[in-house]
Image (cartoon, rainbow, N blue to C red):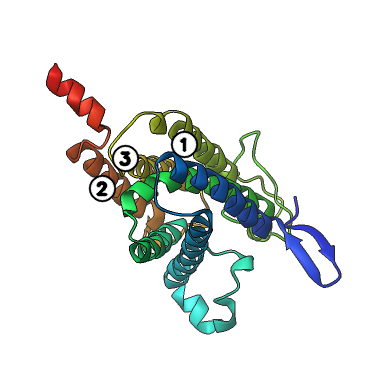
């Protein structure tokens, strides 16, 4: 594996960046399908602009979150702060930044946030799966040493290989890729097929991803720490709990037709 797909003179095309492009293109297609299906008042251009706002907000939030948890290093290496190609994007920060940017854009357009959030959730988790493949080729977001037969020795020039030279590691980025793709299939092929309250698909995405991330984080070697505890596990538990409380207290799995049928019974 190698982070660079190909070079053309001074220009490098990296798998990590390519996965972002693929994720944006696929997200644009999936979100437009859902916007049309739900008759949301956004044009195709609006959808593309919405995605750009969300991606920019997500990248800024992910980087800010990561820098805050490694503040001593970045205060001594200020030029590294914008160098996202060296690794260092925290998904929870990305979720916060992306959600805030999406809310701002939809507010300007007069579009309800939760209905649009349901359109976005399947595309978002699929994009995260693409991103984890980029992490795999980059050799970051890596696991701790393992003697399991599927352990991977990363190239010495990668982040994982330089930290654990010649040692098989848990391919945690692939673990999360599989989990994320499974969540996408559940959201896209099953949960969205029936009428439900706005916010159900998005809240389900948040809860399912957070629980999956909590498990994968156990095998990670490069986790951000909050004292002696992994920050991602604390945040994942908190977010999953909030999402599940909202789902059950608001009975988000119910649609108007379901409630009407229940009243008739």
Q: CA distance from mark 1 to mark 2?
A: 18 Å
First in residue order: circle 1 vs circle 3: 1
Please tell me the numbered disc located at residue 200: 3
Q: CA distance from mark 1 to mark 3?
A: 14 Å
The residue where tag 1 is placed is: 183
The residue where tag 2 is placed is: 242
Report crowding for label 3: few under 14, some 14 to 19, many 20 or more residues within 10 A (C-alpha).
Answer: many
Give the camera-side residue of 211 and 15: 15
Whether residue 15 is visible to the viewer of this picture, yes or no, is: yes
Give the camera-side residue of 252 and 73: 252
Q: Residue at position x 57%, y 46% from top? A: 29
Report crowding for label 1: few under 14, some 14 to 19, many 20 or more residues within 10 A (C-alpha).
Answer: many
Q: Position of residue 235 (x, y in %)?
A: 34, 54
Q: Residue at position x 28%, y 45% from top? A: 243
Q: Position of residue 125 (x, y in %)?
A: 49, 45
Q: CA distance from mark 2 to mark 3?
A: 13 Å
First in residue order: circle 2 vs circle 3: 3
* SS state under label 3: helix
Residue 140 position by quadrant: bottom right
* As drawn, 4 above or below 253: below
């Amino acid at each position: 594996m190698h982070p660079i797909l190909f070079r053309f003179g001074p220009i490098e095309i990296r798998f990590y960046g390519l996965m972002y492009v693929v994720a944006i293109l696929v997200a644009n297609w999936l979100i437009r399908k859902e916007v049309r299906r739900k008759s949301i008042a956004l044009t195709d251009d609006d959808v593309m602009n919405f995605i750009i706002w969300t991606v920019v907000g997500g990248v800024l939030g992910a980087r800010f979150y990561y820098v805050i948890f490694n503040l001593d290093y970045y205060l001594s290496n200020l030029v590294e702060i914008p160098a996202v190609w060296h690794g260092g994007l925290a998904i929870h920060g990305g979720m916060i930044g992306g959600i805030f940017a999406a809310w701002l854009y939809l507010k300007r357009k007069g579009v309800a946030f939760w209905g649009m959030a349901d359109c976005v959730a399947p595309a978002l988790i699929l994009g995260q799966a693409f991103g984890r493949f980029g992490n795999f080729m980059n050799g970051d977001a890596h696991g701790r040493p393992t003697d399991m037969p599927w352990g991977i020795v990363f190239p010495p020039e990668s982040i994982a290989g330089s930290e654990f030279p010649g040692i098989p590691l848990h391919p945690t980025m692939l673990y999360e890729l599989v989990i994320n793709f499974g969540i996408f299939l559940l959201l896209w092929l099953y949960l969205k097929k029936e009428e439900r309250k706005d916010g159900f698909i998005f809240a389900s995405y948040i809860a399912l991803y957070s629980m999956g991330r909590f498990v994968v984080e156990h095998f990670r070697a490069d986790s951000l720490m909050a004292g002696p505890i992994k920050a991602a596990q604390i945040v994942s538990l908190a977010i999953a709990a909030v999402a599940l409380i909202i789902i059950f207290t608001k009975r988000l799995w119910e649609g108007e037709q379901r409630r009407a049928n229940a009243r008739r019974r």
